[in-house]
Every structure is written in structure tokens, then in C-alpha cells.
Amino acid sequence: MYSKGQVVTVKITNITPFGAFCELKDATGLIHISEFSDFFVKDIKQFVNVGDEVEVEVLDFDADKKQVKLSYKNCRPELLKKTNSQIQETGAGFQPLKEKINSLTSK
């Protein structure tokens, strides 16, 4: 019915301090607070309100219970932290270290 990685549109039905419950065609979903952003989330209402329809990604589906674990942030790259491979070397932090390494290895 639902598979991991699938993007679906859900309707937010309730907001609690730990997450947002939502309605799918034939299941109940939960977006845990940790799935709204990789950054600190003080209030889920910064992202959604009851009645909103939003796109989310399926993380897991329990067919017996008809429950779906969902992610809001996975559909919005701006809410994800950059990985180390995306961090660029910038002046102050990396340059002195590079100079020190070069001076030690060139002897």
C-alpha cells in the first residue's frame, strides 16, 4: 500500500508537542517532531497547522495497524543539514592548518 521513500499528500489532523498526526486515504500517519527539520524545532506550528495538506515522505508502514511514519523534512532540502562533503573550506578555519601541514611535509 505504502512503501519507504514514497511521497504522499496528507492532511494534518492534530498537533501535539511530540509530532503531528495526519490522515491518509486509508491509514493514520505521524510526523515526529524530529522529522520536521534537522535544526531545533521549538513549535511544530512553525511548519504546519491543523487542516494543512502537505507532501511528506513515507519512512515506514505497518499494514496491520494501518499506521505510517512520515518525514516532512525529507521533501524540503532546506530543512536538512549539509553533509561534510558539502562543507567548503573557508579562510580562517582551514588555511592556517593547511599552511602548518605543508610546512611540516615540505621539510
Image (tube, rainbow, N blue to C red):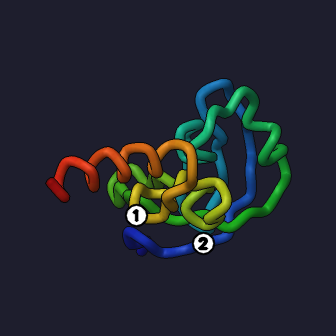
Residue 83 % position (x, y): 44, 57
| Label 2, residues with CA under 10 Å away: few <14, some 14-19, many ≥20 | few
Residue 66 % position (x, y): 44, 55
Residue under pointer 2:
8
Give the image quarter of residue 10.
bottom right
- In this rendering, the answer to whether 88 lies above or below 45 is below
Give the image quarter of residue 85.
bottom left
- In this rendering, the answer to whether 71 lies above or below 100 is below
Towards the viewer: 24 or 78: 78
Q: Secondary structure at mark 2?
A: strand
Towards the viewer: 95 or 39: 95
Q: Secondary structure at mark 1?
A: helix
Residue 31 visible in the current orientation: no
Quarter of the picture containing the N terminus is bottom left
Taking the spot 44% from the left edge, 44% from the top edge, the residue there is: 96
Residue 61 % position (x, y): 38, 59
Between disc 1 and disc 2, whose residue precedes? 2
Towards the viewer: 23 or 4: 4
Taking the spot 55% from the left edge, 74% from the top edge, the residue there is: 7
Taking the spot 20% from the left edge, 48% from the top edge, the residue there is: 104
Residue under pointer 1:
85
Q: Residue furthest front?
A: 107
Q: On the picture, is 20 further left or further right than 87?
A: right
Which amino acid is tagged 2? Val
Q: On the picture, is 83 further left or further right than 46?
A: left
Residue 103 visible in the current orientation: yes
Which amino acid is tagged 1? Ser
Taking the spot 51% from the left edge, 61% from the top edge, the residue there is: 88
Q: CA distance from mark 1 to mark 2?
A: 29 Å
